[in-house]
Amino acid sequence: MFFLKIGKATGRLHNFIVEPFCEHSDTDEMYIAIYSRREHDIILFYERGGIDVGDIDAKARKLQIPVSDGEESVFIPSEQVKTLIGPVGSEKSALLKAFIKALYTIYQENHFTYLEINPLVLVHGKIYILDLAAKLDETALFLCSESWKTRSGEAVDFPAPFGRDKTVEVGNVLLLKAFIKALYNIYQENHFTYLEINPLVLVHGKIYILDLAAKLDETALFLCSESWKTRSGEAVDFPAPFGRDKTVEEKYIADLDSKSGASLKLTVLNRHGRIWTMVAGGGKRKKNREISTNVNEEIVCFASFGRDVTHSSASDVVTVIIHFRDTVCDLGGIAELANYGEYSGDPSETMTFEYAKTILGMLTEGQPHPNGKVLIIGGSIANFTNVANTFKGIVRAFEAYQERLREHKVTVYVRRGGPNYQEGLRKMKESGLLQLPDLVLSRKQNFASLFMLLCCVTALQNTYCHGVVCVCVCLCACPTFCPALSTREPQKLGG
């Protein structure tokens, strides 16, 4: 191969044309070219070709041939070709006319976009092409792969631009393909949710990641605790949001969550809040319970979340937790909402005990509030979580904290359904022997009625506006909206 430098570009010449010598004079040299435009082709001809042809656009005669979609061939009238070749002698004109028509046919059939012959020589009744430059439409390779083959049967080669080695480029493409496939496999196997590399550099046959940003799905920690470790063997760290450090309790629950196939989550919103929750995730009912009430649409919406369930998903679990939180906030309890989290995915009795003990420890810390505190143990209707087992763990936590719970005047509300829920609720009712104020609701009670009952039984009038409390009393007294309270008088429920 021959290396050549042209300007600042250095490259290799791969192809050479060796042709026989044709003896002729300069006056025998002619020029012809064909090139394409959007709606027509143009043929240029000049009877004085060669290396000193000069400004060919100004000197050559032109024949413009209209083309349209679907035309396989275009007929060129002989009169137009005669005008194109101009002063060429009669002894050469007939052969030259036939050559130009045949040349244009080849140009069309083989999808050329440009073809130039300079010089074209006609001597002794024969035409010689001494130099030719042409461009093919690469997008027509599928149509012309056979007709474009060389005399030896080799496929046409579209070389890279001068100064660029195509073999290197092909190698780079293959390397990038392999890298992207491997990168996506890593993305999937390690439960990424986002991954960005910018810039990604490929030089000298190697890939360099100069900057990378990524997000992991924290809920997959149980699956990926080993693969997420650093090179030094340290566990991956999920830092708290900027400006908010994790509490000791949040770190402890996160550690429990990483060791269990269940989902244990905790975020402390207000350690001094009066409304605490232990929410279990669950599914959603296929049929909505119809609710008759004149309360605004948002409250009606939250009041309709008690639904039968046959299937659930991760999104359903989140939905239940958000419904509890939003119902409390929507009904005026945002200032007193203490925590946000869940226990779901069939945690063991021990795991539930540890989770409940952590909640009760924060709930009963510090000085008792004069109006007492509230613990909502709620959830939708579980699919596979053994409610009896999880409630055993919660009751054990009650036993450990019963004195402090009474000291802080904690009222407990329970609303749950699912496998063995009757046994679980029975255990909760029996925990009344611990002398804790409690109310166990059936699974048919919706979230909003649970919170409205909370407003009525506890002395929250000192915290919330009287308008909201009045609405809660009226709704709780309505048998359609809250059947559990249909036999009670609202005035007896106030704190």
Image: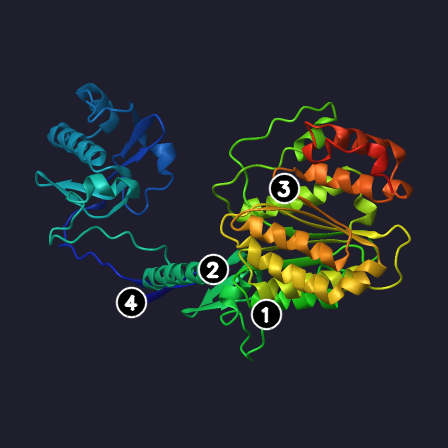
User: Label 3, label 2: how many angstroms apart (C-alpha)?
Assistant: 44 Å
Give whichever of 125, 17 is nearer the camera: 17
Asked whether, in this view, residue 176 is left or right of residue 366, the answer is left
Look at 16% across and 29% down and name the residue there: 97
- Where does residue 243 sit, x and y in percent of width and height? 78, 60
User: Label 4, label 2: how many angstroms apart (C-alpha)?
Assistant: 46 Å
Label 1 crowd (10 A; few <14 / some 14-19 / many >=20): some
Q: In terms of sequence position, does the residue under pointer 4 or pointer 2 come before the other?
A: 4
- Where does residue 141 sit, x and y in percent of width and height? 24, 43
Element type where label 1 sits in the image:
loop
Which of label 1 and label 2 is nearer to you? 1
Q: In terms of sequence position, does the residue under pointer 4 or pointer 1 come before the other?
A: 4
Residue tagged by mark 1?
236
Q: Amino acid at mark 2?
A: Tyr
Which of label 3 and label 1 is nearer to you? 3
Which of label 4 and label 1 is nearer to you? 1
Give whichever of 96, 12 is nearer the camera: 12
User: Label 1, label 2: how many angstroms apart (C-alpha)?
Assistant: 16 Å
Up-down relation of residue 177 to residue 104 (above or below)? below
Which numbered tag is attached to residue 442? 3
Q: Amino acid at mark 3?
A: Ser
Look at 8% across and 38% down and name the residue there: 125
Which of label 3 and label 2 is nearer to you? 3
